[in-house]
Image: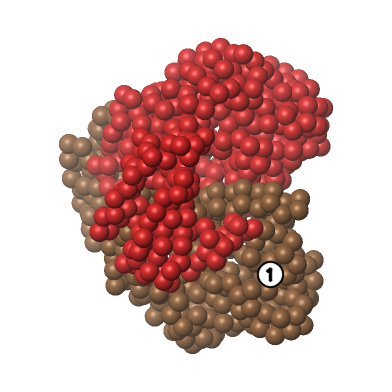
Chain colours: A brown, B red
Amino acid sequence: MWYHKLLHQQSRLQNLMKRGDIAHGLRLSGFKSLFPFSLHWCHTASKSVNCTWHQHEDHLELQYASTVMRFDYVWLRDHCRSASCYNSKTHQRSLDTASVDLCIKPKTIRLDESTLFFTWPDGHVTRYDLDWLVKNSYEGQKQEVIQPRVLWNAKLYQDAQLPSVDFQGFLETKEGLKKFLQNFLLYGIAFVENVPPTQEHTEKLARRVSLIRETIYGRMWYFTSDFSRGDTAYTKLALDRHTDTTYFQEPCGIQVFHCLKHEGTGGRTLLVDGFYAAQQVLQRAPEEFDLLSQVPLKHEYIENVGQCHNHMIGVGPILNIYPWNKELYLIRYNNYDRAVINTVPYDVVRRWYAAHRTLTTELRRPENELWVKLKPGKVLFIDNWRVLHGRESFTGYRQLCGCYLTRDDVLNTARILGLHA
Amino acid sequence: MWYHKLLHQQSRLQNLMKRGDIAHGLRLSGFKSLFPFSLHWCHTASKSVNCTWHQHEDHLELQYASTVMRFDYVWLRDHCRSASCYNSKTHQRSLDTASVDLCIKPKTIRLDESTLFFTWPDGHVTRYDLDWLVKNSYEGQKQEVIQPRVLWNAKLYQDAQLPSVDFQGFLETKEGLKKFLQNFLLYGIAFVENVPPTQEHTEKLARRVSLIRETIYGRMWYFTSDFSRGDTAYTKLALDRHTDTTYFQEPCGIQVFHCLKHEGTGGRTLLVDGFYAAQQVLQRAPEEFDLLSQVPLKHEYIENVGQCHNHMIGVGPILNIYPWNKELYLIRYNNYDRAVINTVPYDVVRRWYAAHRTLTTELRRPENELWVKLKPGKVLFIDNWRVLHGRESFTGYRQLCGCYLTRDDVLNTARILGLHA
C-alpha cells in the first residue's frame, strides 16, 4: 500500500528534516535505504553468483539477489539498448517493434559478470545489466513510489520546522532552488521569503521554477475583490477548501500566490493536505477510497461576465492513482465547480456520496487545517494536485497576484537538478 | 458502443457535408435526430401526462416519454438549482453538500406542467424541469457521445471533399472560425489556406483559435533539420506515424504546422486517423481494445543537447476512453518515446504486445494513410489526441514553424461559438 511506504519514509524524512538542511538530509546514506533496490545499484561482480534464471515456454524467470522477476520475451527484445535498436543520443527507440516476431525466444542466454546476454534467432545480441533489469522490471517498479512525500496535518507540518527559502538564494543559486523544490515535492507547499511585492518579481520567481501556464485567467493573474470574473474567488467571501481548475482536463499543477497588499482584516489562507485526508479514508474505508478513484466526475466553468465568455469541462475521478502500485498522484476536489453527476447509475451515486462525505469529513477536521497569513514578500507555491486551499472572508482592499505552472514542467526542473520526481 | 453511434452519425454527416456547407448541414433538422433526446427539448406541456414516477426506498424511478431514469435522493437534493443552492451568475454550487442528510427523502413530489417539485423534510423546495432531468440523467448521458466525429481512412476523407477555409475569412468572421472548428472537431484535421508564410501570421492564426501552450520547445517553435534539439524531428529522416508529447501527463491537444519554405524533394506529411484504426481493433478484437485502454504506459523524453536539458515523463494508456459510454477521447501512440513497460506483469505484457501489434497493423494499412504536401500558405491543424502524423524523409532546406494548443482551450472556443464539443 502506497501509504505504508509513505509512512515509513515520512518518519525517516522528518528526522532528517529536523536537522535543518533537507538537501543535506537526502544525501545522507540512510536515505538510500528508503528506496527498494537502491542497494543493487552498488552491486559488484562478485555477487553475480546470486543470479539464476529459468527459460519458461512464454517468459524468462530471473532471480537476482532477493528479487524474482518474470520477463516476456518480446519485452526483452523490444527494450534492447544496442546501437541499432536505441538512439542513445535522443534516448528514443529506433527498433520497429512491429518487426519483432510475437513468438520470439532467445537462442541462448549467458551471464558475464553482472550482464545478461541474449542471442536472438537472427543472431542479434541484446545485453542487460542485472541492476537495470531489477530497476526496470514490474517486480521492482511496483515496490517503489513514484514520488516520495511527507503527508501532514497542521501539527506534523509545524513540527517539521521547515527552513524558509530566501528570494536571493532561490534566484541566484542552484542549491537554493533545489532546496526549495525538494521541500515542495515532499510537502506539496513551499514558501519563498523577502520577495519584492510586485507582479514582476513574482513572475521572475515563477519563471525560475518553470514555464508559466497561460490560462483563461491570463499568464500572470492579478486580482482584487472587484467581481471582474464570473467566479467566487473574485469576491471578499470565505472560500472553502478546494483545488483549482478542476474543470481543466488536466488541472493546473502548481499555483503561485503572492499577496501584494492588504489593508483590512481576515483573509487568512487555509491549506489542507488532500493526500493526508485520502490516506485516512484508505485506512478507515478502503472501499470508499476505491470508489472515489473509480467514478469519473465532470467539473465545469461557465462564465459570461463582461467580455469573458468561457465554458470549460474537465473529466476525472476525485482520487487519481497509479493502478500498478495504488499510489495517489492527483486529488480533484471542488464542490463549487463539481458538475452534474451522470456517469454512473443511481446505486453507485448513492455509495459515491457516502464516500465523498467520508473524505469531506477528513478534509474538514480542524487538526488538518493549516492557516497562514500571506503577507507582501512571502510567496506561496501550492501543489494543486495535492494540497487544497481556501480562505477566510476579509475586509478592506486586498491585492493578490500569481500564476499557474504545469506540473510536468516543474517535475522536469526537479529531475534536472537530480531530485526524485 | 461508441463506434456504432459514430458510424450512424458518420453516414448522416457525410451526406450533409457533401452539400458543401458544414455549418449549414448541422443546422438541418435532420441532424437533431442524431442526438438522443433532442426531441425532448421541444417537449410541450401537453405531453406531461407521459410522466410517471415511483418512490422506491432508496431512489426515485422516473419514466418520461420513452426514458426510464433512476435518481438517488441525495443527488436530487445536491443538484438543486434554487437561488440558495446554486449561484446562477457564476454557475457554481452554493449548497454545502456535506450538510445534506445521506438518508434524505422528499416529503412530497408533485408534477406541474413539465416541472417536478420536490419538498424536503426541512421544507426546502427543489424543482426540476423534466427535460433537464432527461438530459442530465445517467440514462440520458450514456446514450450520448461527448464529441460527434466522422472517422476516416484516406478515401473517406477525400470523398468528403471538405471545403477549405480562407485566412481572411478565418481571421475576420465568426462564421469562418466556426466552419473551421466544426470541420476540425469532426475530422481531427483542418487546413487554412492563403496564410502569409511567416511565423507572425502563423501565430496570429493560432491565437484566433485559442491560447498557445508554451512548452519546452517554446511558445512558437521554428525548426530546420539542424539537429538543434535531442529529437529525431530535428533531422531529415522519415518519421513514422505517431502522436506528439506522449511524455506529457496531458499530451498537447492540437498541433499547428506551417511549412514556410522547402527547397528540395520529399517531406510529405502523413496523417492517420487513430480513432478509425482503434475502431477496427474494437470491431475485430474487442478484448485487445480493452487491454490497450487499461494498461498504463510511460513515455519519456530525455534531452541533453547543448543548453537543453529536459526529462519529461507522461503516464497513461494508449487508448483513453470515458468509462460510462466507452467513447474514445485520446490516443497516445509513439513507439519512439515509449519508455520501459513495467506497470503490469509479464503475462499481461505478452497480451499487450499482441494488442499493440493489432493496432499498429491497422494504423499502417496503406488505405488509412492520408499524404499531404505542406506548402507555404497552407496551415495544418492536427488533433494530437486523435490523428497521428509522420513524414517522408526529405532533401534540401526546409523551414517549419508551429505551436501547440491546449485542447481545453480549443473546445472552450468551440463551445462559445455554439458547437457541440
Q: Quadrant of the C terminus of chain B?
A: top right
Position of residue B154 relative to residue B54, above or below, is above
| Chain ID, mark 1 | A
Q: Secondary structure at mark 1?
A: loop
Can you give x and y, in whole percent of width and height, for residue A323 in the image?
35, 53
Position of residue B209 relative to residue B345, above or below, is above
Task: Give left or right: position of B78 versus B200.
Answer: left
Residue B264 sits in which quadrant? top right
Task: Give left or right: position of A107 versus B272.
Answer: left
Can you give x and y, in whole percent of width and height, for residue B351 in the image?
28, 36
Position of residue B118 relative to residue B186, above or below, is below
Can you give x and y, in whole percent of width and height, for residue A170 in the image?
68, 72
Position of residue B240 relative to residue B120, above or below, is above
- Amino acid beneath label 1: Thr
Residue A32 sits in which quadrant? bottom left
Q: Nearer the viewer, residue B393 or B250?
A: B250
Question: What residue did someone put label 1 on?
Answer: A235
The residue sitting at 65% across, 61% down in the picture is: A231
Residue A208 sits in which quadrant? bottom right
The residue sitting at 75% across, 73% down in the picture is: A399
Q: Nearer the viewer, residue A97 or B124?
A: B124
Give the tally of numbered discs: 1
Q: Is residue B135 visible?
A: yes
Q: Nearer the viewer, residue A331 or B50?
A: B50
